């Protein structure tokens, strides 16, 4: 057995020597990786962004870290992230899909794709979401209708404490349903609830440590339960969506598109009729783009709303100030997007919620499109890059109180709303969130309408101090499970 031990040690030593030889000294600095594991052993696997924040204190704003065998260059702080994503957007603008999402997307859709296909899908999605509402009155009306439905749901609890999670998810998902399929669903329609519940479960699984381990060591974690569950969820959603699509196809009227799917089907048909058979408008791109819009556009917005209500319950004086502003400027009528400019404090509270909660701490992984010397460091073409958005949203050089809930970050001396450059929860540059304007409209209308109608407080027996602002483990950072009371004000 001592011979075996000696043999094993020699092999390990050899691997170590080989891998240190390939450890490129030109790379941005970083902790020394060990063979196979890279820097995993020093990583907080549940909350990797925390380790990355710590490392940026030691190694600066551009550093290298190894997730297992995978090399990642991390960008930290406002100046660096902005320079990379905005000034060098062509170089830092490709996507590097996780292995698991690549298996599900195969380079289709908008979120995880690159090249011409990405460009076409992104352009088409942007134009059509705009046509079907985004930034338009039609969309505002849809959101307002959904706000009214949500009020009814909250009222039914008659001031008893409940978990706002699922109700907010349903309301927000319905906005995407209206825009994509052309109609909303009733909250008790099993076709709808299963769609939304599957989506939230998928988001949780995507951020789970075992799926992350699979992305790094596919051979070892291929059989993990989380991966299998995720693939199954995706297959079920695919089936359901294909059924929706064929129904829409059967009832299609090219003169009157009901939503994004109709517009896509019409475009596909037109291209086919003119003899173009190799366009990007094919069924797989339709499916993935639709699934992307749901995945990217529902959890994010509803999670932000959940943070907003939790923060209001925790800081009642701020809540009262919002309600006071709403009473003074709006009164009892329905809030409109056009009112935003007259509600500086409320607007500041929404911005500060997004800043503090920083729900997508590492953005989505980017990839360099060519070699570049960036801030004196050499970064090779094809390198995975994490723009550490949370380091910008909590950058001590940019924010007076980076770790507190402090709406004054967005107010000047006259209490007027001020835009802040370091406010980038939607990221920036070529890959900036496609749904930013829709999300901002939703956050504003849902938040103000809910606060006009309800006072949010902790559950009985829980003090404000006890409301925990720690975020749960997952790809998007959501609050830990909690209940709130929505006490009617009208
Ligand atoms: C991408 C944030 C809502 C659709 C992203 C990214 C972030 C983000 C950080 C990654 C950007 C990057 O890689 O640098 C948010 C937040 C939201 C929100 C905080 C809500 C509060 C939405 C909504 C939609 C949407 C409502 C859909 C209508 C997308 C898409 C991408 C994306 C399609 C991928 C863009 C691309 O790769 O070209 N979002 N998002 N998002 N978001 Fe959002």
Image (tube, grey):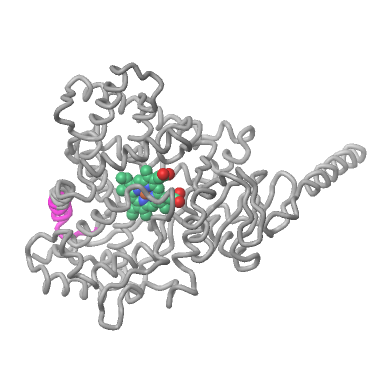
Rendered location of residue 20, percent (x, y): 79, 49
**Figure quadrant of residue 478:** bottom left
Rendered location of residue 429, percent (x, y): 43, 53
**Figure quadrant of residue 472:** bottom left
**Figure quadrant of residue 307:** bottom left
Looking at the picture, does residue 173 appear above or below residue 329?
above
| Residue 172 visible, this angle | yes
Looking at the picture, does residue 73 appear above or below residue 189?
below
Image position of 262 (left or right of 70): left
In magenta, the rendered stretch is 148-161
* Residue found at the very far right of the displayed protein: 3
- The quadrant of the picture occupied by the N terminus is top right
Which residue is painted at 28% across and 66% down in the image? 458
Which residue is painted at 49% across and 57% down in the image? 87
271 or 296: nearer the eye?
A: 271
Rendered location of residue 114, percent (x, y): 48, 38
Looking at the picture, does residue 421 appear above or below residue 297?
below
């Amino acid at each position: 057995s001592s011979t075996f031990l000696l043999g094993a040690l020699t092999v390990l030593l050899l691997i170590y020597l080989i891998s240190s030889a390939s450890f490129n000294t030109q790379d941005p600095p970083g902790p020394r990786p060990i063979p196979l594991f890279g820097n995993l052993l020093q990583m907080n696997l549940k909350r990797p962004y925390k380790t990355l924040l710590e490392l940026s204190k030691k190694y600066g704003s551009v550093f290298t870290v190894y997730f297992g065998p995978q090399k990642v260059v991390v960008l930290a702080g406002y100046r660096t992230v902005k320079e990379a994503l905005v000034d060098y957007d062509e170089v830092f603008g490709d996507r590097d899909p996780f292995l698991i999402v690549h298996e599900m997307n195969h380079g289709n859709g908008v979120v995880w794709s690159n090249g011409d296909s990405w460009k076409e899908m992104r352009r088409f999605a942007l134009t059509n979401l705009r046509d079907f509402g985004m930034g338009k009155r039609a969309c505002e009306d849809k959101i307002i209708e959904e706000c009214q439905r949500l009020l009814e749901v909250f009222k039914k609890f008659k001031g008893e404490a409940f978990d706002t999670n699922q109700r907010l998810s349903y309301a927000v998902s319905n906005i995407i349903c209206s825009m994509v399929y052309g109609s909303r669903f009733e909250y008790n329609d099993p076709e709808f609830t299963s769609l939304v519940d599957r989506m939230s479960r998928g988001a949780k699984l995507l951020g789970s440590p075992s799926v992350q381990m699979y992305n790094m060591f596919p051979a070892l974690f291929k059989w993990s339960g989380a991966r299998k569950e995720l693939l199954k969820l995706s297959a079920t959603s695919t089936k359901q969506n294909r059924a929706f699509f064929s129904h829409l196809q059967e009832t299609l009227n090219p003169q009157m598109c009901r939503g994004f799917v109709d517009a896509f089907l019409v475009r596909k048909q037109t291209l086919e009729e003119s003899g173009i058979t190799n366009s990007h408008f094919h069924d797989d791109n339709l499916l993935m783009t639709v699934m992307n819009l749901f995945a990217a556009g529902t959890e994010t917005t509803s999670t932000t709303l959940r943070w907003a209500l939790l923060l209001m319950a925790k800081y009642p004086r701020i809540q009262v100030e919002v309600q006071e502003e709403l009473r003074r400027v709006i009164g009892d009528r329905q809030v409109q997007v056009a009112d935003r400019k007259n509600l500086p404090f409320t607007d500041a509270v929404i911005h500060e919620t997004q800043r503090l909660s920083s729900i997508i701490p590492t953005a989505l992984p980017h990839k360099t499109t060519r070699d570049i010397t960036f801030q004196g460091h050499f970064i090779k073409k094809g390198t995975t890059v994490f723009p550490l958005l949370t380091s910008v949203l909590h950058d001590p050089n940019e924010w007076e109180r980076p770790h507190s809930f402090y709406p004054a970050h967005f107010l000047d001396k006259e209490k007027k709303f001020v835009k802040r450059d370091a406010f980038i929860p939607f990221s920036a540059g070529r890959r900036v969130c496609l749904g930013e304007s829709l999300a901002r409209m939703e956050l504003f209308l849902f938040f103000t309408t809910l606060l006009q109608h309800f006072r949010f407080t902790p559950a009985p027996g829980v003090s404000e101090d006890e409301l925990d602002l720690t975020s749960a483990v997952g790809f998007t950072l959501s609050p830990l499970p909690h209940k709130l009371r929505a006490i009617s004000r009208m």
